Amino acid sequence: MTLFPVAPTFHPADAAFAEPARNAYGDLPEWRLDDLYPGMESDQLKADLARADTASTAFETRYKGKLGEIAVSPDAGALLAEAVVAFEKLEELLGRIVSYAGLLHAGDTSDPVRSKFYGDVQEKITNASAHLLFFALELNRIDDTVLEVAMRHPALGHYRPFLEDIRKEKPYQLEDRVEQLFHEKSVSGRGAWNRLFDETMTALRFEVGGEKLALEPVLNMLQDADEAKRHRASDALAATFRENLRLFTHVTNTLAKDKEISDRWRGFKDVAAARHLANRVEPEVVDALVAAVHEAYPRLSHRYYALKAKWFGRESLNHWDRNAPLPDVPQRVIRFDEARATVLGAYGLFSPEMANIARRFFDERWIDAPVRPGKAPGAFAHPTVPSAHPYVLLNYQGKVRDVMTLAHELGHGVHQVLAAPQGALMAPTPLTLAETASVFGEMLTFRALLLETTDPKERKAMIAAKVEDMINTVVRQIAFYTFERKVHEERREGELTSERLGEIWLEVQSQSLGPAIHLGPGYETFWTYIPHFIHSPFYVYAYAFGDCLVNSLYAVYEEAATGFQEKYFDMLKAGGTKHHKELLAPFGLDATDPGFWQKGLGVIDRLITELEGMEK
């Protein structure tokens, strides 16, 4: 724990909790954030914070109110390109600073020193970036024909994807002062509520068997082979969520209202319209995905859970049994070095280059894997900025799902490394495509493991685990999306009570999981811990989009003779420079085709059929 400039603060009662995980799972890496900055008090960071403010102010002074004039000048292309380059450098600088603060905070959100630092940095970056707001607004006031002529200059033409992208926002832009107000108040508005949720969730403790644990270990118990332990974990989750229900209800209502105000001012009619625009995906494409998944509930989740209940000798399973391991299948702890070898081996079979990129995350300490009190729950891959590199956060606990999570997040990491040369303005990928490499990485790992498995029981367990992951990624995420839609639509008419939120949650979960899953008392509170509802409303459908896309993509890979890897890498390297239709065309795929989603869902269907065949 000495790699951080300020050591995380552990309470004495937590010390015994943190240490055994290292022994059980082997040597778990912790990330080295000094690749970004040496520390919170470093001269380099202080200098960059000062430069962020002065350089942003200087940029505003130089260009504000002048872009329209520049655009019709004889050297318009070169001069506008110079402005975009300067803007990109500022975005890179601000991104580096805020990435460091965010990652440091994620490592221990319970540390008051880190929390203050994170809040102070957010405020300073918000103030600095307020000087840059005018840039996109003024670019969008330039006449299309005038800008098109300017983009004939190669230097500005390079940024065509960025310029065309921001012009999609033009119909929803507000007057400059209103945009500035929205921007500056985000620190005390949405940003503050996000931080409250994060710090509250990581501070919660759940009592199981007389021991008080953080969220991640208790969620992990829902996958334990011991049913009594799963039941106790579920009860502990429900008890603590219920104790904090008033707070989570208030946060949800406040953020939903905040979004409604923003949508109304900007002219977004549908509650998810802003997310579709940000994802650069047509609403009808998302609607087709949602309709296809809803229609597939009976033949996917309902059918699978009925089969799983049969394996357990029951008519139905309790909600705490949904992710239980199969009976009579030996459970073992997978050490981290084995997980590393498994994922890198699977990546290497597809492409040595892909494995080499992923290996750097281990060798150069870009991964933080241990479970620690105060550490952010879940997992993520954060791209930081192109001049640095991504970082991966895990909460590794030695299960097959943890191996798949490692494969998933490393897929994101590989994607982010490959897209980085596009630069700070064009490397970021819309969420719908951002899940492609991660889910593809999972599929490569699953197929590699399956090829090595000859024992029928182990093979059955592995396929069942994959089906469950796919159901969690497709069915469950679309149910989440449906829940969000109902919540945000009802919030337009007034606040929702905790009871009403629970009713909506149970309604959509019952529809998606089917009659073979019994949703017992306490489950109505489980909506409270889903961070995507708080941080990124309607993000969740991107998982289903990515999973179905990858299922179709993987089918093309299995049938392709040569050239697939090259086309796949070209897709990842494109970052955010191309629309999903353009990226998928080389593979003969089209997400606007009504039959596209059925291809992806058919993969899950066939795996369930294979499991049913094992019963005969």
Image: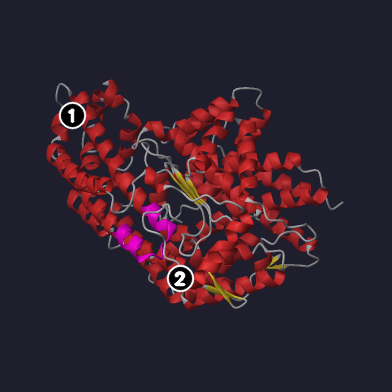
| Span of residues in magenta | 102-119
Horizontal side of 305 relative to 502 (left or right) equals right
Q: Main secondary structure of the magenta part?
A: helix
Q: Residue at x 52, y 29 (%)?
A: 569
Horizontal side of 17 relative to 91 (left or right) equals right
According to the image, label 1 marks what residue? 71
Quadrant of residue 137 within the rendered picture: top left
Q: How is the image coloured?
A: secondary structure
Where is residue 434 drawn, in percent x and y? 48, 42
Residue 290 in view:
yes
Q: Which residue is drawn at 38% across and 64% down?
A: 111
> Does the magenta portion include 51?
no
Q: Which residue type does callout 1 highlight? A: Ala
Is tag 1's residue or tag 2's residue first in the polypeptide sequence? Answer: 2
According to the image, label 2 marks what residue? 11
Q: Tell me, for residue 243, which label it has, or none.
A: none
Tell me how far mark 1 sits from mark 2, CA to CA: 59 Å
Q: Which residue is drawn at 38% across and 62% down?
A: 194
Which residue ends up furthest to the right in the rendered image? 616
Where is residue 329 drawn, in percent x and y? 78, 57
Residue 595 in view:
no
